[in-house]
């Protein structure tokens, strides 16, 4: 659920002075508070009153998960490989980064890389942890351990392998993990497919019976952080039926482990007779779940319907669009649910005291941001707080930090995308961005004038998808909405009218087109789909007819991207409509 364009755009500092909305209208209270108490706030983030943020570090690579040492040093794992733009130049040095603020300025003035490099064949990873004086990190198909000498900033010796042979490939080739105080190492081994279809992400393809993918994917595996040279085995599975548990939040008091769940995609795209176009954007919910030994959380047979507040049967396994329950009655539902496709990439339990009492004993969640809400407005790209008590949620979540994406909230337009969260021993909250490699530090500096907490509640889980995003940007009076395509070239045999129709389909205004979710609003590509403006083609000769054929047939096994493109892009296009989209894409590539 994601995209990363490399646009070095400065975030306007003025954004930091805008008040985050509460239940009522915005006021100037936060503006004066931020100006008077946050003189070093250069983040551009929107935060509740009393909080400040600084850019702790910038440009360190695709920063994913983090951990903060007792001495305040921040360790970050960065990632590369097929998840990011093809042929991208990877930074020199190790994929692991140590960040230290020696002057108390709120910024890292010491930055050191260590660990394996791209030259050694590594692609980095997501997971990272500190345990018993060592740094643990994911790299490729392994979890490794570096001894950290006392007083040292980075390790001086080589890594030893803790676990190897973790599955790679498919839709979710990552292995985030957490280590609890007793040395238990819990590793997410996410699914290779969207819904265990016989043909992944394909119209009307049924689910595999049985879903043998669950033998080695789609769950959490348990190992011992004190041992070395352990081999991945299906026998070590701890819990199953979890599509993608990228985040782990551990309650050190109650011993509970909470995991995030990336809900499935493409209900309408693959089953248009059962789901409305807007339900592509609103179903199913993302979730936080309580991890239990031998727990079964329902993937791929089930998904969470927020309107009914329960798990229902997926269409690949006999579901009828949200009514039938079947085997889902015996599966474990979420502790808390969140808007569809927001992408919960990390979770951290807040067990410190710096923040106000409202934020004690709950979890902060990094939402990477959606793509499958297209052509409707995208969502996420923020940090959410979910209050908890014991093993259950105790209230509505709130949008704690926002403004990462900048003015354009979309996969191709977002400047920054939250991907990791970590709590420091002093109670500060760190947030990583895997687009431009920015690390933010959020601190609490004082209360509000009223003394009452002010926060922005999360959107309702049953809120509508909204208006088609492009249609909201109305053209100037007297200018036709297709005026922009008039300047595009026309392939031989086509017309400007065909290109105008193709543009409207591409942007979701006709035929429920979803092209922007993968290829971006302007066709410049995301991590899920190629740049259509470069006139470089892998599946055709680049002619209008060739492009149309690729759109019609789809791409079952992409060469440079992780997930397939369904036939007709997942929309129900007529031949004439597919031809119009082909003409528009040809025009983009020749403009």
Image (cartoon, rainbow, N blue to C red):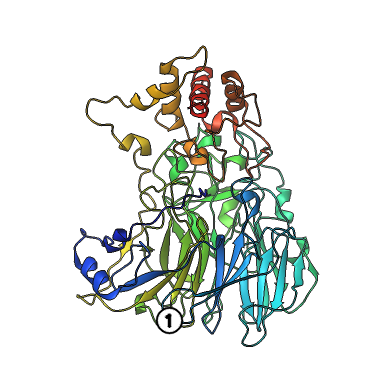
In the image, is residue 372 above or below residue 405? above
In the image, is residue 436 above or below residue 581? below
Residue sitting nearer the eye, 359 or 439: 439
From this viewpoint, is residue 179 visible?
A: no
Q: Name the image quarter holding residue 554.
A: top right
Q: Is residue 38 left or right of residue 437?
A: left
On the image, the x and y values in percent for residue 128 come to: 62, 70
Residue, x 61% and y 26% (percent of image)?
Answer: 550
Q: Where is mark 1, residue-wise?
A: 104
* Mark 1 Cα shell of 10 Å, populated few (<14), some (14-19), many (≥20): few
Q: Is residue 380 left or right of residue 97?
A: left
Residue sitting nearer the eye, 290 or 546: 546
On the image, the x and y values in percent for residue 398 come to: 36, 63
On the image, the x and y values in percent for residue 421 come to: 49, 68
- Residue farthest along the top direction in this orientation: 493
On the image, the x and y values in percent for residue 133 come to: 65, 83
Residue sitting nearer the eye, 545 or 366: 545
SS under mark 1: loop
Q: How many marks?
A: 1
Residue, x 24% and y 67% (percent of image)?
Answer: 30
Q: Is residue 77 left or right of residue 253?
A: right
Q: Name the image quarter holding residue 134.
A: bottom right
From this viewpoint, is residue 426 visible?
A: yes
């Amino acid at each position: 659920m994601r995209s990363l364009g490399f646009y070095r755009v400065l975030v306007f500092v003025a954004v930091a002075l805008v008040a985050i909305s509460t239940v009522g209208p915005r006021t100037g209270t936060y503006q004066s508070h931020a100006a008077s108490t946050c003189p070093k706030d250069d983040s551009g983030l929107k935060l509740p009153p009393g909080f400040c943020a600084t850019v702790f570090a910038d440009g360190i690579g695709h920063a994913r998960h983090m951990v903060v040492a007792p001495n305040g040093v921040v360790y970050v794992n960065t990632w590369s490989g097929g998840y990011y733009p093809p042929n991208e130049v990877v930074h020199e040095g190790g994929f692991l980064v140590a960040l230290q603020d020696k002057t108390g300025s709120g910024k890292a003035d010491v930055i050191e890389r260590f660990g394996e490099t791209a030259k050694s064949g590594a692609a980095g990873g997501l997971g990272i942890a500190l345990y018993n004086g060592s740094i643990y990190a994911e790299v490729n198909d392994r979890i490794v351990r570096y001894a950290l000498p006392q007083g040292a900033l980075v390790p001086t010796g080589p890594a030893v392998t803790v676990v190897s042979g973790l599955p790679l490939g498919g839709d979710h080739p990552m292995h985030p993990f957490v280590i609890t105080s007793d040395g238990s190492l819990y590793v997410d081994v996410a699914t290779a497919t969207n819904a265990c279809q016989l043909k992944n992400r394909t119209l009307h393809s049924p689910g595999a019976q049985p879903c043998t993918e669950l033998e080695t994917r789609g769950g959490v595996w348990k190992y011992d952080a004190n041992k070395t040279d352990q081999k991945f085995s299906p026998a070590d599975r701890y819990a199953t039926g979890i599509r993608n548990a990228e985040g782990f939040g551990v309650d050190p008091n109650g011993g509970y482990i909470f995991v995030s769940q990336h809900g499935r995609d493409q209900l309408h795209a693959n089953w248009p007779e059962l789901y409305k176009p807007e339900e592509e954007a609103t179903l199913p919910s993302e979730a936080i779940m309580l991890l239990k030994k031998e727990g079964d959380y329902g993937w791929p047979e089930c998904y969470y319907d927020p309107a009914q507040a329960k798990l229902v049967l997926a269409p690949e396994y006999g579901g009828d669009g949200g009514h039938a329950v079947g085997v889902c009655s015996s599966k474990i539902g979420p502790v808390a649910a969140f808007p569809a496709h927001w992408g919960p990439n990390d979770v951290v339990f807040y067990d410190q005291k710096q923040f106000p009492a409202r934020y004690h004993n709950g979890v902060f969640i990094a939402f990477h941001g959606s793509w499958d809400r297209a052509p409707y407005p995208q969502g996420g790209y923020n940090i959410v707080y979910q209050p908890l008590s014991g093993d259950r949620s105790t209230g509505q979540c709130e949008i704690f930090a926002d403004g990462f994406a900048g003015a354009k909230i979309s996969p191709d337009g977002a400047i920054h995308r939250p991907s990791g969260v970590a709590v420091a021993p002093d109670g500060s909250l760190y947030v990583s961005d895997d687009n431009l490699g920015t690390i933010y530090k959020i601190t609490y500096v004082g209360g509000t004038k009223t003394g009452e907490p002010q926060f922005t509640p999360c959107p309702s889980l049953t809120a509508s998808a909204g208006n088609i995003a492009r249609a909201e940007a109305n053209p100037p009076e007297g200018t036709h909405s297709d005026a922009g395509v008039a300047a595009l070239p026309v392939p031989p045999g086509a017309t400007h009218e065909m290109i105008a129709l193709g543009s409207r389909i591409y942007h979701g205004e006709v035929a429920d087109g979803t092209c922007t979710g993968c290829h971006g609003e302007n066709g410049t590509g995301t991590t899920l789909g190629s740049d259509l403006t470069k006139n470089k083609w892998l599946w055709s000769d680049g002619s209008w007819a060739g492009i149309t054929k690729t759109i019609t047939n789809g791409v079952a096994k992409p060469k440079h991207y992780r997930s397939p493109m369904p036939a007709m892009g997942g929309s129900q296009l007529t031949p004439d409509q597919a031809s119009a989209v082909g003409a528009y894409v040809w025009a983009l590539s020749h403009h």
